[in-house]
Image: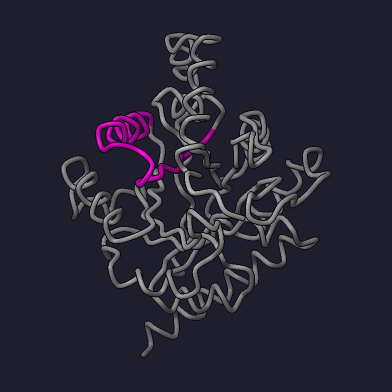
Amino acid sequence: MSEPDFLATMAARSRERADAARARRPQSELLASIRDLDPAKRLHRSSEGFDLIAEMKLRSPAVGQLRRGDRDNLEQRVMSYAEAGAAAVSVLTEPSRFDGALEHLEKAALALRSHVVPTMRKDFLVDSYQVLEARAAGAGGVLLILRMLPRDVLASLFDTALEHGLFILLEAFDEYDIDTAVRLIEPRIGLKSTATSGSLVLLGVNCRDLVSLQVVPGHLEALAPKLPHWLPRVAESGLTTADDARRLAAAGYDLALVGSALMSGDHPRDLAAEMLAAGRSAKRSAACS
């Protein structure tokens, strides 16, 4: 499958959705609804050195349909992630290629309302309004794609998320993106305070090629040494087994974002628990060596 302008296409569609949403519900109304909410949940990190962001999505452009019936079982699936020990539940809200909806985020947050685990909106966000939508839907965090947006727009989304207490996963694809992340974070949070700020900001590496949409072997390991150690490091895409989690934890990653493998399997709780155990074992081994 090839789509040279995948990110540009997704950004354009996201802009259309943001404009339509703002026309239906002015930003002033959205802000008013947020004022009555409890504080956003923080990322639920463990002290064992490795964590999982487990993803709820119905379709992947690279894989196709993942779970046809899970619209009705969404709450059950996100609870299984939380019970397995996930640090957060990522929810795809992009409709055209991932069959997502903001309603899925709302349902997931409601299902986890009595649980410490937060939800995170994963989408191709282009407008601060969409960050506010995530907060109003009950999310504790948002994903921002570094390569997709100009720096001033990234800064606006980043600042809006921080203002409303959301954690931020910055998604990088290469060293240039990593440099962009550091330049974005440093004047706002600072290098030293980031490590003690409750994991407000994470830096992830996506190993999926944006043209072929296929996973690039070795990409996560190659970029691991380039990631700043004062940020929690997230391995994204391509993790399907406990051995993958062990390998990437050994390479230096602190978290993994796993979607398709959990969604396509019939026992997501077991796989999530196995990945966590393998990653944490690798971290313990590294600490002892």
Q: Is residue 52 magenta?
A: no
Q: Nearer the viewer, residue 95 or 113?
A: 95
Looking at the picture, does residue 177 appear above or below residue 126? below
Q: Nearer the viewer, residue 98 or 3?
A: 3
Q: Nearer the viewer, residue 167 or 56?
A: 56
Image position, residue 244 (x, y; %): 56, 75
Dominant SS type (magenta): helix
- What residue sits 38% from the left and 73% below the top? 252
Q: How many marks?
A: 0
Q: Quadrant of the C terminus?
A: bottom left
Looking at the picture, does residue 189 appear above or below residue 250? above
Q: Is residue 190 left or right of residue 107?
A: left
- What residue sits 31% from the left and 58% below the top? 231
Q: Quadrant of the N terminus?
A: bottom right
Examine the image and state in which quarter residue 125 appears.
top left
Image position, residue 230 (x, y; %): 26, 61
Q: Is residue 132 left or right of residue 231?
A: right
Looking at the picture, does residue 214 appear above or below residue 93? below
Q: Is residue 126 left or right of residue 25?
A: left
Q: Is residue 142 magenta?
A: yes
Image position, residue 4 (x, y; %): 49, 49
Examine the image and state in which quarter residue 188 appears.
top left
- What residue sits 67% from the left and 56% below the top? 83
Q: Which residues are magenta?
A: 139-164
Q: How is the image coloured?
A: one colour
Q: Residue furthest bottom?
A: 289
Image position, residue 282 (x, y; %): 48, 80
